[in-house]
Every structure is written in structure tokens, then in C-alpha cells.
Amino acid sequence: MERQIHVIVLILLSIFEVWMCYQVLYRTVLEKKYLRNWKKVLIWGNILGVGLLLGVNRSMFFFSSLMSASCLLITIVVVLAINGKPKWLVFEITAIYFLLVALSDFFFSFCGMTFIDGFYHIFYNYNLSIEKCTVFLISRISILLIFWLLVKHNFERILQKTIQCFLIITVIGLTIIMILYQILVYDIWHGMSDVKGWSAACSLFTILTGFIFCVVICWKNQRLRQENQILEMREKMDLKNLKEISEALEKNKIQIHDLRHHITILREYVTKQEYGLLKEYLNQLLVNYAEIKEKEWTGIKNIDILLNENMKKAEIKEIKFQIEADILRYVPFTETEGSVLFGNLLSNAVEACEKIDNEEKCILVKIKKKKTFLFIEITNTFVSIPQERDGELITDKKNSNIHGYGMKSIKRIVKKYDGFIECQVKEKNIVSIYVFIISKKEVKEK
């Protein structure tokens, strides 16, 4: 009876292990809410089937490389049948999970050898023991706690091709560690090594922690480097656009200055009743003269340029554009940062309104200064409610890998100046972005 209970416990723990694997996959490569019924059946068939095989195998062996590889292959095939892509990412994440679980089993077994004499018999004895069940239970609880901590800290979806090299390095590294400690267990069992349980546990923990730490640090550095490069590129592009707008305004000033000359010629044509020449001259003026409404809204040149330019774009696209702004004596951010901040906020609002058909389109921009606080509100109509994932707004553009950096630029600048940003849906088709930034310079002056 005791043997049957141990087998059932091992099977249940193995089923739980495979179930946790799918929880990891749901956070990375699988969209759980879009799964059809037949896919759910296939997943549960995989969980129960692989869990049963692992449990029965573990009732005879502590660890079997062949069985683990077979179960890994079955799980990968099932996930690929459900998702289809990305193939390498599915393999890497699934392999890393199973390798970490196996190494966790080895670690807690080594710990058991430290506190209980003869505990090492669970590695190769064919008997079912409470020690073996205890090791697997503690190991899976530890993996569950680690997974819970990752989820609690907004574990992001790993979908970028740029990190696949780090994942494959992790798979290779964990596989090498696994092989080395399998050899160590064999040597301990046959008396070929004097390594004790505590030494083996400490060395495994140190090597595993150090390896994962190095991979994570390298990955984060690479990711930050790439994001910084993209953000710098966007800032340069925004600054270039600002310069082009400034040149256009300067050209417009020249045209306005020259307007009196055109009026003189037009008056002469009217006086002589040369209406054919008058019409031809007017046509030439309409082609060459493009009016840009230049108005001082805030007193900050680059911000006013962006406001005027986006107002012009909105009018062309039949979007009602309203501005309520205070005259600002000082802003806490640099000219480039101000251009990026307002450029992205205004562009996002205009792009959202462009998608609306046969409905009123409007944008309201409020820029207020109260004591030491700069308050920015951008309210606009939109087609669909902005979606969020882990507290982040998701871009609805086709290529999400190269879009969405505008909001990241905004948040980076706001965070730099100890501010905060908030998105609020007021009505079914109206959304507002609020930005609050404190002006530290004026605080010091007071």
C-alpha cells in the first residue's frame, strides 16, 4: 500500500511540474485566452501523459536523461502544434525550465545527504522512499515560488529575437552543469569521489547562480544598449524634424515680408483691369506660398513650433484642434527632451484621430504651470480602447517591434524629472494622457 501511495505522489508531482511548464509558456510564447478547445485538450493530454510517464519513471530512477529528453521533445512538439512559431524560442524556454527543475532536484538531494546519513540511496535504489517524494515536493515548491516572484515583478514576455543567443547559451550552460553533476553522483555512489553532500550542494548553487547572473547581466546590458540606440535615433529624427519646421517658418516669414510687393503688383493689375494676368499671378502665389500659422502659446520656441505644426496637420485632416496654454518662463527639461516629449504626445493624438471615420475628431491640449508643477493634458478621440499588458500601453501598429518607443521616450523623460504619467479613458471614445513634472529649479530658488 505504501508503494502505491509513493507512486501516486510522484505522478501527481510530475503532472504539477508539466503544468508549471505551461504556465511559463503562457507568459512567453502562448496566448492562453486565444486557445481553441482542441488546443486545450491537447495541452491537458500533454500534461497528464508526460506527467504519468515521468512519475512512473521516477518510481524506478531518481533521474533518467533519456526519459527527460523524451518528455521535453513531446512537450515541444505539442507547443509547436498549437503555436507554430517561434520554434527556437519554444525549444529554449521549455528546455531551460526542465533543466532548472532537474538541477533543483539534485540540489535538494545533496542537501538531504548533508543532514541524513545514507540519504544518497535515493539516487539509484529501486525502492520507493519518503525521502524521494520529499525531494521532488520541495524542489517543485521552490520552482513555484521562483515563478510566483517573477510574475509578481511583472515578468515580461520574451519575444525578441535579439535575446535568443542568450537563451541558447543558457540551455548549453545548464546542460553542461547537469552532465557534470550526473557524473559526480555516479562517482559518489561508486565511492570514486570524496565530495560530501554539503560541498556538492554549495558548489551546484554557486555555479548555477553565478552562471544565471552572468547571462542576465549580459542580456540586460545588450537590451539597454539597443533601446538606447533606438531612443537616440528617434531623438535625432525628432530634432531634425524640428529644424525642418524651423526652416519652413523662417521661409514663411520671408514670404510674409515679401507680401507687400505682391500686393503692389496685384493692385496694379486691378487698376489696369488686366484680369487674365491677375488670375495667373494669383495661381503662382497659391503654389509658392504656404501659410504656417505661427502663434506663441507657451513662450518656449520649440514647443510652440510643435504645437503650430500639429495644429496645421490636424486642420488638413479635419481634426478639431484646441490649445489652452500658460506662458512658461522655464521648463525643467532640455530643448531636445521637450521636443521629444511634446512631439510624441501630439503625434500619438493626431494618429489616433486619423483612424476615426465618419465621427467627430478632436484634440485638446492643456499646458498649465502651477507653482512648481508643470501639468500637460492631451485629450483626443480614438477608435478602440488602448490595451495594456503588465501596466504598459500596447501599440496597435502592425510591427510592434519597431513601434511603441514613443511612449518609452515619454516615460523616460518624465521619470528623469521625478514626474509621472497617467492614461485615463473618460468616455467610450475619449482618452486623456496626463503628465506631471516638478520644476526643481524654482523649488531651489524659493
Image: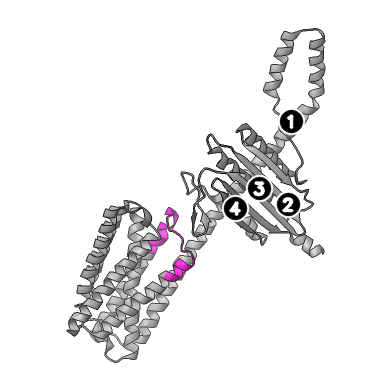
Residue range corresponding to the magenta coloring: 148-169
Q: CA distance from mark 1 to mark 2?
A: 29 Å
Q: Is residue 431 left or right of residue 76?
A: right
Residue under label 4, please give it. Answer: 409
Residue type at mark 1: give it: Asn
- Quadrant (top left, top right, bottom left, bottom right) of the C terminus: bottom right
Residue 113 can be seen in this image: yes
Seen in the picture, residue 277 relative to 48 is either above or below; the reply is above
Looking at the image, tell me whether mark 3 or mark 1 is earlier in sequence order. 1
Label 3 sits on residue: 342
Residue 130 screen position, x and y as percent? 26, 85
The residue identified by callout 2 is 368
Q: Secondary structure at mark 1?
A: helix
CB-based contact (under 8 Å), mark 4 and mark 2:
no
**Distance in Å between CA atoms under marks 3 and 2:** 14 Å
State the SS at label 4.
helix
Residue 252 is marked as 1
At 20% from the left edge and 73% from the top edge, which residue is drawn?
57
